[in-house]
Image (cartoon, helix red, strand yellow):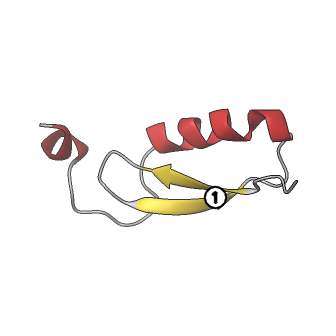
Amino acid sequence: MAVKKCWPVNHACGHISQADLSDHPAGRRAGYARLLAERDCSVNCTILASLVAA
């Protein structure tokens, strides 16, 4: 069975990025992907998160 190494990260602004989490332990990858989603988007985004959530 293959172990998932790349996780989608859904940012509050609406952007979705892929994170290669192969350097993290397998049991902590999903949690780390959720942590990354809470952080600011790495794209130079002009969409304000507060407008998307409204």
Give coordinates of residue 52: x percent, y percent.
18, 46
Which residue occupies 40% across, 49% down? 11
In this view, the residue farthest toward the front is 1
Q: Quadrant of residue 43?
A: bottom left
Looking at the picture, tell me which residue is in the foreground, 41 or 14. 14
In the image, residue 47 above or below residue 43: above
Give coordinates of residue 15: x percent, y percent.
37, 60
Q: Quadrant of residue 18?
A: bottom right
Say whether residue 6 is left or right of residue 18.
right
Which residue occupies 29% across, 51% down? 13
Give coordinates of residue 12: x percent, y percent.
33, 45
Which residue occupies 86% across, 40% down? 25
Q: Quadrant of the C terminus?
A: top left
Which residue occupies 63% across, 58% down? 19
Looking at the picture, tell me which residue is in the foreground, 45 or 54. 54
What residue is shown with label 1? 19
Question: In what element is the residue under mark 1?
Answer: strand
Give coordinates of residue 53: x percent, y percent.
19, 38
Say whether residue 45 is left or right of residue 21.
left
Residues packed near mark 1 inside 10 Å, few (<14), some (14 to 19) or many (20 plus): some
What is the three-letter code of the residue carrying label 1? Answer: Ala
